[in-house]
Amino acid sequence: MTEQLTTFRIGEDVFGIEVMKVQEVTGPPTIVDVPLAPSFVRGLINLRGQIATALGLRELFGFKTQAEAQMSVVCKIDGNLVSLIVDSIGDVVEVSRNAFEKPPETIPADVRKFIKGIYKTNDSLLSVLDLDRLSKELSNSKE
């Protein structure tokens, strides 16, 4: 059994999302700030007339430095458009579910809660994002 993932990088780390959950990948979006939003909510973007919430994964995962060029991975989560702001886009990869492991305890808890698990690939570790947890975090931050 295999799974297809769209991959992207934040710093040197490689992350993935199930291909079927990705609506599109775009270049750096124009972001409109949202006052009083948590630091990981970068703001809102206009995606051809549809509004999407832009989430900075660097801020969410606690990366200190800002990347120069950034990309947007647009996903539909619970009927809402969400733009994940990442450093760069990778390839679509097919991984064997046999290589899937739970995230290790050594990953900080505030990051681990957003990781479904990790695949060992030939050249790196691939952390799979848990979009449902990301959605819950976004919902909790609105309260």
Image (cartoon, helix red, strand yellow):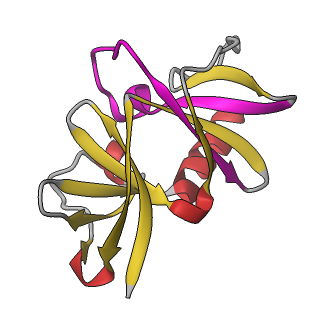
Of 60 and 79, which appears nearest the observer?
79
Q: Quadrant of the N terminus?
A: bottom left
Of 9 and 128, which appears nearest the observer?
9
Residue 88 painted magenta? no
In the rendered image, the vertical position of residue 35 relative to residue 72, given as above or below = above
Dividing the picture into quarters, in which one does residue 10 lie? top left
The location of residue 46, given as percent across then percent down, is: 77, 24
Residue 73 painted magenta? yes
- The outermost residue toward the bottom is 1
Q: Quadrant of the C terminus?
A: top right
Q: Residue sitting at 54 percent across and 25 percent down?
A: 27
The location of residue 68, given as percent across then percent down, is: 36, 12
Of 138 and 126, which appears nearest the observer?
126
The location of residue 62, given as percent across then percent down, is: 32, 28
The location of residue 40, given as percent across then percent down, is: 51, 26
In the rendered image, the vertical position of residue 2 relative to residue 79, given as above or below = below
Q: Quick check: 102 left or right of 135? A: left
Q: Quick check: 60 left or right of 104? A: right
Q: Residue sitting at 32 percent across and 52 percent down?
A: 112
Q: Residue sitting at 73 percent across and 33 percent down?
A: 52
- The outermost residue toward the front is 91
Q: How many marks?
A: 0
Of 101 and 126, which appears nearest the observer?
126
Magenta range is 50-77
